[in-house]
Amino acid sequence: MTAEILEPRRRPTQERSHKKFDHLLLVSRELLLDVGFESFTCEEVASRAGLPIGTLYQFFQNKYVIVCELDRVDAVAVRQELASFANAIPTLDWLKFVDRLVDHMAALWVGDPSRRAVWLAVQSTPATRATAAVTERELAVEVARFLAPLTPGTPRERRTIMAEVLVHVVYSMLNFSIRDGQEHSESIIELKRLVASYLLSAEHT
């Protein structure tokens, strides 16, 4: 049985509705950090946002849809980071390119700890996991394009799988790097080694 993919009931088309939609997501992110996903409720989101609960339900069926939308928002920022490096590809010194890209990605996670809270929340049910997987695959399509000039000897089909693996592993490692008690800088060094080794081996196997 295929898990349901969670989407907002509707997306705003007018500026006023956009502001309410974005405000609800902002408050949801703050609440998620404050209380964790188990204690997170739509009623509390609406209360903190100063909006009727009916307004929230116009957009979001439940809290699971909210966290999946937050996950999509986080993926947009990652795509923007990738796009900002587009002019650096192809490059002869691609290992330095990978290092810089990982550093920029790590800065996103350090600067916004809610990313880890969102990532943990979308692991909570089959439907949220399935929805997060779709978001990861969409991001992997773009990563595969970046991999093409870095791994010219790799078949397209394998490059697609590699991109999906990289997105999942990098997300997991970035969230690991900012958990309580974890040495962030050491984790990022290991992530860089992992990514570089994986890409180097792809061209020789």
Image (cartoon, rainbow, N blue to C red):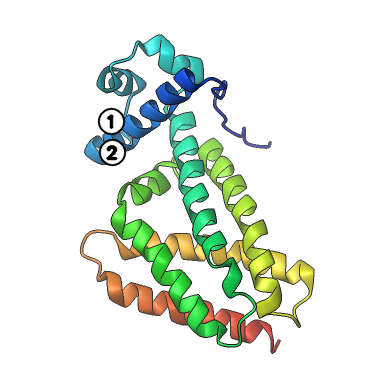
| Gap in angstroms between the C-alphas marked 1 and 2 | 6 Å
| Residue 75 screen position, x and y as percent | 51, 49
Amino acid of disc 2: Gly
Density class for disc 1 (Cα within 10 Å; few <14, some 14-19, many ≥20) is: few
Above or below for 187 versus 116: below
Q: Are the residues at dot 1 and dot 2 in contact (C-beta closer than 8 Å)? A: yes
| Residue 185 screen position, x and y as percent | 29, 74
Above or below for 83 versus 133: below
| Direction from residue 202 to residue 29 in the image, left or right | left
Q: Is residue 60 in view from this perspective? A: no
Q: Look at mark 1 in the image and give the residue it sits on.
A: 39
Q: Quadrant of residue 199?
A: bottom right
Where does the C terminus fall, quadrant-wise?
bottom right
| Direction from residue 205 to residue 93 in the image, left or right | left
Q: Look at mark 2 in the image and give the residue it sits on.
A: 36
Amino acid of disc 1: Ser
Q: Is residue 33 in view from this perspective? A: yes
| Residue 114 screen position, x and y as percent | 32, 46
Residue at x-position 36% and y-position 73%: 188
Where does the N terminus fall, quadrant-wise?
top right
- SS class, disc 1: loop
Residue at x-position 25% and y-position 22%: 48
User: Mark on residue 197?
Assistant: none
Above or below for 184 versus 121: below
